[in-house]
């Protein structure tokens, strides 16, 4: 959705780190998510962060949140060819928009061997 | 455990025809969503529901109607299909502010 913006493409070499960035506009967002979509499939949750946190680490994944700038990033360490997919940033609304779940356009990550 | 099931998986409609897409979830989730996915546009929220009997508009609600008569089902209706509604439609469900589980999608072509 237009409230959530991401760059559309990222290419990295296998073994390097990937960083996917996202910006959002809703200051009442409570949770922010990263989803992964492989070709022909639905979306699967990778990780999420609550809006009062600034970092979360989960194995090869690190999520950084700058709430002041409304900027979210996903870092994938030691990127593998199997990580090639579309990655979506998403945010849930709060207050009067509680329950609304908006996605960005997705970042196509291509990992070269 | 079926999770989120969408029917049908594929459909071809003629312009002006109507149809209903069914989404069913067996996880007792409060929230349910309908999205459309188009190349380069990501997922755009059509309508959503925060509980049985409630619905709300998302980003692109025009041309679609929804109903949530039962907690486990969320129906998406197209009253008069247009070629611009050719897309892949995804349904999702979740508890309050937790992981959303997605169906496998419905590929709809309007000719």
Image (cartoon, rainbow, N blue to C red):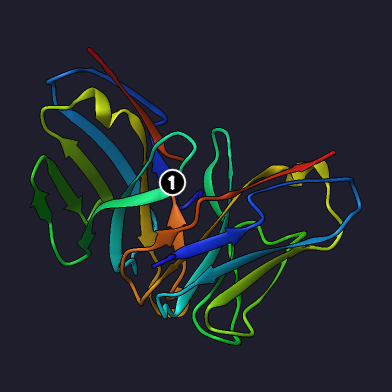
Residue named by callout 1: A104
The outermost residue toward the top is A113
Locate the N terminus of chain B by quadrant: bottom left
> x and y percent of residue A83 in the render?
26, 31
Taking A66 as reference, is B66 left or right? right
> What crowding class fits label 1: few (fewer than 14 Cα within 10 Å), some (14-19), or many (20 or more)?
many
The number of discs equals: 1
Query: Where on the picture, by quarter, is residue B78?
Result: bottom right
Residue B16 spot, x, y in % from top left: 91, 52
Mark 1 falls on what kind of element? loop
Q: Can you tell which quarter of the image residue B66 is in?
A: bottom right
A60 relative position to B72: left or right? left
The image quadrant of residue A107 is top left
What is the residue that sits farthest to the front in this orientation? B1
Q: At x 20% / y 29%, what residue is drawn?
A: A18
- In the rendered image, residue A102, in percent from the top left (x then y), is placed at 45, 57
Identify which residue is drawn at 19% across, 52% down.
A66
Q: Would residue B78 appear left or right of A84 to someone viewing this image?
A: right
Residue drawn at (34%, 64%), measured in percent from left and top?
A: A27
On-image quarter of the C terminus of chain B:
top right
Identify which residue, B89 or A68, lies in the foreground.
Answer: B89
Above or below, comparing residue A15 to residue A70 in the picture: above
Instruction: Give the residue at x 36% y 76%.
Output: B95
Chain containing mark 1: A
Q: Position of residue B14 (x, y in %)?
A: 89, 45
Q: Is residue B9 left or right of residue A17?
A: right
Examine the rendered structure and indicate whether residue B49 appears above or below residue A105: below
């Amino acid at each position: 959705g237009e409230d959530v913006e991401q760059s559309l493409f990222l290419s990295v070499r296998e073994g390097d780190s990937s960083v996917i960035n996202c910006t959002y506009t809703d200051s009442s967002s409570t949770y922010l998510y990263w989803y992964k979509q492989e070709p022909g499939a639905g979306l699967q949750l990778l990780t999420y962060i609550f809006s009062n946190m600034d970092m979360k680490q989960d194995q090869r994944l690190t999520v950084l949140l700058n709430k002041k700038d409304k900027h979210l990033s996903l870092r994938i360490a030691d990127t593998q060819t199997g990580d090639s997919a579309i990655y979506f940033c998403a945010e849930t609304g709060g207050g009067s928009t509680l329950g609304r779940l908006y996605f960005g356009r997705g970042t196509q990550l291509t990992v070269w061997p | 455990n079926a999770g989120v099931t969408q029917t049908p998986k594929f459909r071809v409609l003629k312009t002006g025809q109507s149809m209903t897409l069914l989404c069913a979830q067996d996880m007792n989730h409060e929230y349910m969503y309908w999205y459309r996915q188009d190349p380069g546009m990501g997922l755009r929220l059509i309508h959503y529901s925060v509980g049985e009997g409630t619905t709300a508009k998302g980003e692109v609600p025009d041309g679609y109607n929804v109903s949530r008569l039962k907690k486990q089902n969320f129906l998406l209706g197209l009253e008069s299909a247009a070629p611009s509604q050719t897309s892949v439609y995804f349904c999702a469900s979740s508890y309050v502010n937790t992981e959303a589980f997605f169906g496998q999608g419905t590929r709809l072509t309007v000719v």
